[in-house]
Amino acid sequence: MINKKLPIFNLLCLFCLLGGIFAPSNLFASIMVSVPYTPQNLDKLMLKHLDIAYLHPKGDIKIIIHSEEELKRLKKIGIKFTLEHENIEEFYRSRLNRNLPMGGYHTYREILAFLDSMYARYPEIVAPKESIGATIEGRGIYAIKISDNPLEDEDEPEVLFDALIHAREPEGMEVLLYFIRYLCQQYQHDSIATYIVNNRELYFVPVVNPDGYVYNELTSPGGGGVWRKNRRRNPDGSFGVDLNRNFGFMWGIDNYGSSPTPSDETYRGSSPFSEPETQAYRDFVARHNFRLGINYHAYGGWYLYPWGYTQIKPPLNDIYQIYSWRLSRFANYIPMQGSMLYLTNGSTIDWLFGDTLSHKRIIAFTPEVGGPDDGFWPPVERIVQIAERVMPANIYFSLLAGAYPMANFASAFDSTGNPIDPGESGTVNVSFRNIGLDTARGVSAYIVSLDSAVEILPEPVYIGTLPPFESTRNYPFRVFVHPTKIPGSRCYIEIRTTQSDGFYTSDTTFFYVGTPRIIYQNKFDGIIDSFRVSSGPDWERGTPSRGVGPDSAYSPPKCWGTILDGNYNPLSRSILISPPIHLEETRLPILTFKHWYIFESYEDSLYDGGFVRVRRGSETIPLEPVDGYRGTLYGSNPFRGVRAYGGLSAGWETAYFDLSPFAGQTIQIEFVVGTDFYTEYPGWYIDDFTILDYTPTSSVAIGLRNILADKIPLRIYPNPCNESFHIGLQRAEGYVKISITDILGKSKLLYSGMAKKGIEINARGLPSGIYFICVESDKAISTGKVVIIK
């Protein structure tokens, strides 16, 4: 039977019955049991070094039992537990393709053949596979390098990806093979893949533990094997060392995060780097200058980072916060310091980051790929789905090893510092930040309007050099909003940031047009508050507890949050409701507030989440934010099927909701939290609740209005061009000046004199690239773009 929960008494009776028929060596198939999560239960299990497969704080702890001795050990602890799968390997196999070796996962030999095939097909960017050492049984541990000059050691940022240090976690290996295939197939076709290959040196070790993986092939040829360690024969007759407890940094610091007992699943070995596999890994790292490292594991849907051995924050914690949040957002995983899950010592990423004597500090992560239902061997149809889901994070991680300049903050104002009204000009003010590990050079930026009623002068700003993690001042970009734009509507713009090596980032944002008036505002800081809890146990008003949710309210001291000093409750239906708000004299009302959130989720499935709705008398109407929710509530959530915020926010964010359908009415706003029965997180925090109203304005256009409203008709051809191009002018009168600006912001005067209907421009001295043409007269201005290809 599969996935059937049995009382443990029946399970023990089954073992006793089978014990009279079969010899003990044939008796036991690995089973999975679950235990309710409490810190006390986790401590007991960790001290007994049972095989914890998966856990969620305040959820269940899933344990694999491999022998009768382990079952007796668990029983002695005195914790109630439930049988999840009476044969976990058979359960995993049942979801795989029984007609393929390893159920559809690559075998060890197939992995090596794949690496060889990538070199054979793409020798210009793939080096031959390299043996970095041999296992205890003599198998090769192989690495492959991808770069534009793969046989040369160039002065380019190096990144390390590895997987299968635990032999039962093949999805991490599949993720790496998928990423390798993408880089090779898309080189010279996809701009990002091409940039990464040309400007990085990427190294992949798909199987760190070949012996353990081959053992799973031999014992479970259809896939689903749960052997974890390597295959060292220990003095007590047991087999295996947990390679992810055998690294030299904080090795064996306690008997909680690793075990001194050879038969345990977390046995750390007789000494640091006692195993040939970890020695090979150590020596490989020493021969290189890796900046970043990804050590793939399964499963859980987390991005874990150091430390694993202590809950003290690591050095460079701010960088880890930035990177882990961004990496996690791609797959909707949860970022977490590893020790917050449970303690480990002698782990790979702690050594990569912590041992600064044998190598330079390497920023390292452990993605636990796959969700709670995927297990160690996700169903065969999930192999590619998971790999596709996390590939954007692999791309992003590769880029972070070098320079990564991007827009940091944007705001829009007119010349008096007020919002821009229809028919007015103003500036979009943007600051920039480099979040990469290299200094960004030759940085420039420009803005593109994504709205036909908004025009932006193509005046690139030249920023120059931007060191890692430094931010710039605000740079202004001139903008004009046409009189036809409705107050209260959004103007979308794209901010493009480039650097001298051709890398660019693109960020899309928006600003509201018009000067609003405040209809209602509440920052929740009074002695009493007009908001109230109408249902459920979770919503509280006060000061957040540091280390649980946000460090403080957005506007200190107070905000509303779901349990200010802990996690929200399971199976919650908690509702926070505003007082009646009168919109009778509004035209275009908008709700805006600041919020911070982290909910249990995986990929697009939100197990827990929060959403906003309007209450109008006894009727409730769900609201959709202008930039959309993160997904749909799922599973046993009481609001299953409702779209909601889930996963995690980027710190305090600003939310906007269009209330124009309710103009002229009296309404209340509800903040609704729904959670399932399983796992809880800090939840949702709300501050600076505001309702604005926009009305038509009689402002007279200033500044750019006349410039852009009275444009000179402009034609540029041929476009793209090679040696020259022609600028056709119509209705241009008097004196004109024509200039050309490259994407780095460097301008050059092309022509000044009396207007002509056509002007020929010599482009022989201009390198390939995108250029902006600006034609100015006393009364008007016009702009265009030309692409030069040499």
Image: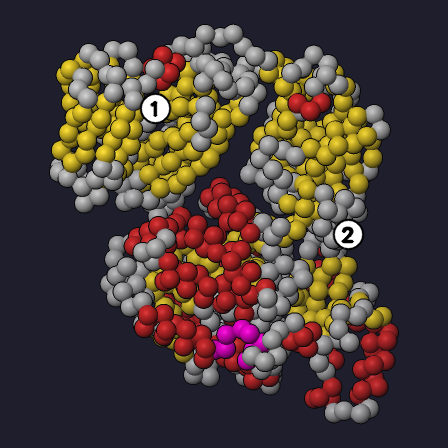
Quadrant in which the N terminus appears: bottom right
Number of other residues with Cα within 10 Å of mark 2, as a class: few under 14, some 14 to 19, many 20 or more: some
- Determine which of the numbered discs, if any, sits on residue 636 in the image: 2
* Residue position for label 1: 457
State the image coordinates of residue 255 (x, y, percent, origin top left): 61, 65
Kindly state the secondary structure of the residue where label 2 is placed: loop
The relative height of residue 668 versus residue 166 in the rendered view (above or below) is above
Quadrant in which the C terminus appears: top left
Name which residue lies at 83% across and 81% down.
14
Is residue 98 something one can see in this rendering? Answer: yes
Name which residue lies at 57% across and 12% down.
696
Amino acid identity at mark 2: Ser
State the image coordinates of residue 656 (x, y, percent, origin top left): 61, 28
The relative height of residue 704 versus residue 19 in the rendered view (above or below) is above
In-front residue for pair 195/724: 724
Amino acid identity at mark 1: Leu
State the image coordinates of residue 680 (x, y, percent, origin top left): 71, 48
In-front residue for pair 704/434: 704
Kindly state the secondary structure of the residue where label 1 is placed: loop
In three-dimensional space, the C-alpha distance between marks 2 and 1, rounded to whole angstroms, equals 52 Å
First to last magenta residue range: 101-108
Q: Was residue 350 drawn as part of the magenta stretch in this picture?
A: no
The relative height of residue 456 versus residue 137 in the rendered view (above or below) is above
Classified by dominant secondary structure, the portion drawn in magenta counts as loop
Left or right: where 251 falls relative to 400: right
Name which residue lies at 74% across and 92% down.
23
